Amino acid sequence: MSEILYLDLAGGISGDMLLAALLHSGVPRDLVEGELALLPLRGYRMTAGPEKRGGLEGWRVSVEVEKEEHPHRRWTEIRALIEQSGVDERAKTLALRVFSRLARAEAAVHGTPVESVEFHEVGAVDSIVDIVACSVAVSYISPRAVLCATPVLGSGTAKSTHGTIPLPAPAAIELLKDVPLRVSGARGETVTPTGAAFVAEMAHVVRETPAMRITATGTGFGSRKGRGSGLLRVFRGEPYDTAQEGEDIVVEATVDDMNPQMVPRVVEMLLAAGAHDAFVSPVVMKKGRPGFSLCAVVPRESLSPAAQIILSETTTIGLRYRTTNRVRLDRRIETQDTRYGPVAIKVASVGDHVFNASPEYEDCVLAAERSEVPLKEVYAAAIEAYRRKHENEGSS
């Protein structure tokens, strides 16, 4: 089972912090240095190793540049440098995507064509090393998903090649335009453009730490020092679900003046429109009136269709919705032969561990009608046949 990589961004993120955290989590340093040696890039020395801050153990990475005659590099030059290297193809692809995002962000901020973008701080040797090295480390882990906490950007000002710029850095804001984020009153740069590019390119922001069995952690320190700053943690682990983890929208409406005969149609329409689940619960409303609460759990892209169905098909004059996290077991259908005929079994599992195995109701009804036996006998026969089959497989 491939693992989840979760980035805890409480202390910010930069390229060197991400690399340090990934190395601390168990990515082989020799592997990263070996891939970096395949870049046609010289005149630098990367140091990486343990460091302790505030009682916490972690790693710190720094890149010392001997002499850089051309600190300003065009995006086309950087792209060719990486493309022509012997770096692992997966890592090379990720590094190029990250730099491409940076180029587009810089072009938007400075009002220039992408191909004419010149990188300054980001284009320096140390940043090229950070991005390629991080890409190598992520490719080594090869996570099925990269998740992260909401980025929190600092404020104030910082010096750059263009002079004093406001924080959050314009390029970081441009990179995170479509990403949930917060801007805090913390002074200084907490999220660098390089860190923002990695978040935007490979991570999905979640509200809470994902449901996972943690197998490795890593802490990376940056150049900033201070309470809660310059520290990035990564968690690696096995997901509790193998297919679907993320966020859903819960849509609710309460109704006390509608013919209940119409309710099943509304539920069916919501399910047909993409709802993961839809159900009705009895409630007592104002003045003691009996009514019902209609609830639909939908992916974000189905919020508008679900709201339209509820508002048009029921007598409610409003609805509520909220975001919620979900963890769903992987599900598959197995057809099981029984003495009453074939019956589909819905199996819910994590990897090889089965949590539930349930016969499909409609198949059981058809088998019961064909064999003229009680439904409960078909159901029991299907469960027993499934259990025997898998016991025999386990003993063989």
Image (spheres, rainbow, N blue to C red):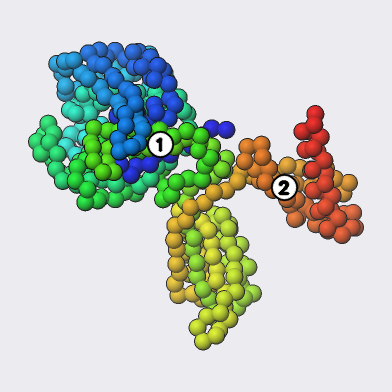
Q: Which-is-in-front pick, marks 1 and 2?
A: 1
Residue 326 in view here: yes
Q: Is residue 192 above or below residue 79?
A: below
Classify 148 as above or below 371: above
**For the point 58% across and 66% down, which residue is it?**
266
Q: Quadrant of the N terminus?
A: top right
Can you tell which mark lies on residue 357? Answer: 2
Q: Nearer the viewer, residue 227 or 393?
A: 227
Picture coordinates of residue 349 (x, y %)? 65, 43
The part of the image, by quadrant, that contains residue 385 is: top right
Q: Which mark is residue 341?
A: none
Looking at the rendered structure, the kind of residue marked 2 is Ala
Q: Disc number at residue 234?
A: 1
Q: Relative to 286, is 395 above or below?
A: above
Residue 120, percent from left and from top: 17, 28
Quarter occupied by the C terminus? top right
**Left or right of 249 on screen, residue 112:** left
The residue most toward the right is 372
Q: Earlier in the sequence, mark 1 or mark 2?
A: 1
Looking at the rendered structure, the secondary structure element under dot 2 is strand
Residue at x 57%, y 76% (from the top left corner): 283
Residue located farthest toward the bottom when viewing the structure as drawn: 287
In the rendered image, which quarter is residue 34 located in?
top left
User: Residue 213 versus residue 357: which sits nearer the camera?
Assistant: 213
The amino acid pointed to by label 1 is: Val
